[in-house]
């Protein structure tokens, strides 16, 4: 699905109702953040096996649903803010965000506590490395959103609301201002506000490969061959409304401020070349727990 799209499939697998209210989220954040080994600003995502993808609805690249096992890892509680990213620019490690993007709509995307946007995958990777971290893998991101109960959105199965997240609007908002939208481990803004760059190459057939149970995509050569095959079979739409890639692109996850409610679903997969800088794409970092 393209990042500027205004439509999205809202169909998905039937899953049990989840009670993920604000009080429970506050308790999880407090308990997680007091862990003596917690890196500053990060919350632990428990290791384990969860269901990734879906059996129906969405796009072809979201199928089939399958078990994936991930190790425990730390994930930034919030999307990286402009203030945090600017420190990397001052340190001469990261390139500045795209100035024209920040100036869009009279500067609506500027703000010290707004998520940084207008940065490439390479810049996102460099920021995380500078912080002694890394970008999350695609399976890790979905684990952080879905937890153990296979929820459709970070907060549960209930439809997105303005209280829970930022969607169907024209700009981002300050991070961590929608506590009722927290994920199962206490993370903020996992769906909506901005899309987030992912470490993995985007693989439309990742869920049917030998490494699927570990959340591993194919090699770049395997990915290119798969994309060429989909194109030859006229399967445009299998990877969303964007054209089927002709190169190895990077995965992007989490939905954004300009997306409709259905596009924020936990299984939605997006892809773009790593050099792209977009006003709806930012980042957060991960770190191994062991």
Image (cartoon, rainbow, N blue to C red):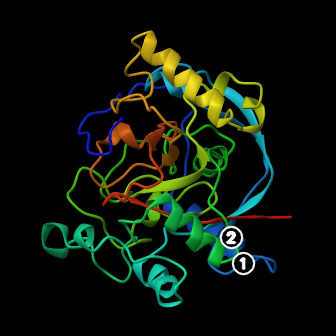
Whole-percent x and y of residue 214?
77, 37
Determine the residue located farthest toward the top in the rendered image: 233
Quadrant for the N terminus, please. Answer: top left
Decide which of 166, 31 is in the foreground and name it.
Answer: 166
Percent across and percent down for residue 167 are 30, 52
Secondary structure under the numbered disc 2 in the rendered image: loop
Residue 47 in view here: yes
Q: Are marks 1 and 2 in contact (CB under 8 Å)?
A: yes
Seen in the picture, residue 7 relative to 117 is either above or below; the reply is: above
45 up-or-down from 150: above or below: below
Q: Please tell me which residue is depicted at 56% across the width and 63% down the height of the picture.
A: 187
Counting from the top left corner in percent of width and height, residue 232 is at 44, 12
Which residue position holds label 2? 133
Residue 43 picture quarter: bottom right
Residues at marks 1 and 2, CA–CA distance in whole angstroms: 10 Å
The residue drawn where x is 52% and y is 83% is 88
Residue 206 visible at all = no
123 vs 72: above or below: below
Tell me the residue that label 1 is attached to: 39
Q: Is label 1 in a helix, a strand or a loop?
A: loop
């Amino acid at each position: 699905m393209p990042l500027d799209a205004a439509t999205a499939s809202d169909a998905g697998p039937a899953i049990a109702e989840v009670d993920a209210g604000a009080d429970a989220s506050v308790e999880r954040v407090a308990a997680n953040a007091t862990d003596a080994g917690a890196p500053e600003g990060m919350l632990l995502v428990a290791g384990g096996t969860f269901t990734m993808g879906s059996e129906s609805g969405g796009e072809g690249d979201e199928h089939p649903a399958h078990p994936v096992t991930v190790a425990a890892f730390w994930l930034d509680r919030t999307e990286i803010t402009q203030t945090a990213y600017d420190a990397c620019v001052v340190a001469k490690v990261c390139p500045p965000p795209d100035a024209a993007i920040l100036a869009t709509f009279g500067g609506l995307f500027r703000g010290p506590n707004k998520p940084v946007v207008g940065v490439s995958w390479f810049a996102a990777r460099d920021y995380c490395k500078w912080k002694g971290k890394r970008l999350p893998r695609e399976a890790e991101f979905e684990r952080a959103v879905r937890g153990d109960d296979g929820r459709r959105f970070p907060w549960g199965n209930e439809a997105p609301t303005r209280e829970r997240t930022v969607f169907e609007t024209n700009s981002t908002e300050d991070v961590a201002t929608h506590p009722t939208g927290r994920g199962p481990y206490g993370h903020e803004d996992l769906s909506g506000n901005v899309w987030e760059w992912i470490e993995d190459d985007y693989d439309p057939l990742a869920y049917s490969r030998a490494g699927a149970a570990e959340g591993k995509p194919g090699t770049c050569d395997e990915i290119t061959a798969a994309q060429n095959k989909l194109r030859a079979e006229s399967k445009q739409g299998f990877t969303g409304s964007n054209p089927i890639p002709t190169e190895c692109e990077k995965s992007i996850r989490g939905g954004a401020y300009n997306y409709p409610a259905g596009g924020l679903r936990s299984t939605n997969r997006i892809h773009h070349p790593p050099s792209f800088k977009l006003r709806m794409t930012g980042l957060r970092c991960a770190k191994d727990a062991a």
